Image (cartoon, rainbow, N blue to C red):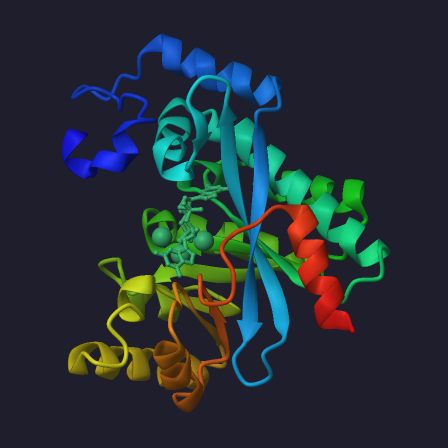
Amino acid sequence: AKEHGRNRLQYHIHRPDAAGVMPLSEQEELRSAIGAKQFFLEYQPQVDVASGRIVGLEALVRWRHPRHGMMPPGQFIPLAEESGLIIPLGLFVLNEACRQAKEWQVMGLPPLTIAVNVSARQFGDPALAAHVTEALEASGLEPQWLELELTESTLMHDVPRGLHVMQALKALGVRLSIDDFGTGYSSLAALKTFPFDRLKMDRSFVEALPRDETTVAIASAVISLARRLRLAVVAEGVETDEQLEFLRQAQCHDAQGFYFSRPVGPGEIAKILARAGD
Ligand code: C2E
Ligand code: CA
Ligand code: CA
Ligand code: CA
């Protein structure tokens, strides 16, 4: 894992070894961290490009590790997937995101879609739809405010089952988005096959806008394709004025990225929303 960049190494937990076996101590650490409430959520705004209004928030999990400090999800989600601990962790994320979204609504802040990432193993859990139902019921959040972000590889792994689960989730009234669009092997097949409401164009198609011609061509085509299919498009990883201006001209619906805000805690979000509501 050393080649993955120097600054990540400092807080690095060892990856599973070549045989894919995660040392028990790390599993135990992750397991007890869930019980010890060391996980919490940050939220990143999604902004309507035309109006500048905040229309949604993506919930992103963080681990406040007692010895290593703040750990980004890239360092523990793979371990959680591997060990199956993503199931209880994902349940925490789902319940906490719904609870928080409802709390903001009750505070009188403008209602927003809350987007929650669902990993492959969670999607494979037969109890997923029941867990979503429970999270909605426990929080009192209406289903149209919840969006589940799925990736292509999660779905294409078993297409008939993917369709079945997506239909069950749609029947609950929640929205479904395809995350990291364009990074998989069968992006167009996934669009053709599955009933998404929203498409999240991966950051790699936003980064080089507007100077790289190939990126411009791909991003424009993805946006118009999504519009033709009546999917809302969210551009991920927007960092500059120039990128935003390009997206505005290309009629991309929404944008998310450091340009607007980094992922921040619920207190900061409440302040941002209160300002936006004035
Ligand atoms: P993702 O779902 O693609 O989430 C977007 C990631 O891009 C976040 O990283 C976010 O902080 C980062 N990002 C947002 N705007 C910008 C930008 O303008 N520039 C750059 N360079 N990056 C930006 P984060 O929070 O580290 O999450 C990484 C990945 O971990 C997520 O990618 C997602 O796959 C996974 N993840 C995070 N939270 C959860 C969760 O609750 N459940 C599951 N299953 N996976 C999660
Ligand atoms: Ca996501
Ligand atoms: Ca993404
Ligand atoms: Ca990603």
Vertical position of residue 229 compared to residue 80: above or below: below
Please give the name of the residue rendered at 50% of the width and 79% of the height, measured from the top-left corner: 253
In the image, 271 versus 219, the foreground residue is 271
Q: Position of residue 272 (x, y in %)?
A: 67, 62
In the image, 49 versus 227, the foreground residue is 49
**Residue 256 in the figure: left or right of residue 36:** left
The quarter in which the N terminus is drawn is top left
Please give the name of the residue rendered at 78% of the width and 44% of the height, measured from the top-left corner: 139
Please give the name of the residue rendered at 35% of the width and 33% of the height, measured from the top-left corner: 75
Q: Position of residue 114 (x, y in %)?
A: 63, 56
Vertical position of residue 166 compared to residue 22: above or below: below
In the image, 169 versus 261, the foreground residue is 261
The quarter in which the C terminus is drawn is bottom right
Q: Position of residue 271 (x, y in %)?
A: 71, 58
Vertical position of residue 186 compared to residue 231: above or below: above
Residue 184, quarter of picture: bottom left
Residue 154 in view: yes
Residue 173 in view: no
**Residue 39 in the figure: left or right of residue 79:** right
Residue 250, quarter of picture: bottom left
Vertical position of residue 162 compared to residue 36: above or below: below
Specify the farthest residue to the top. Answer: 25
Q: Position of residue 117 (x, y in %)?
A: 50, 48
Please give the name of the residue rendered at 52% of the width and 50% of the height, measured from the top-left corner: 165
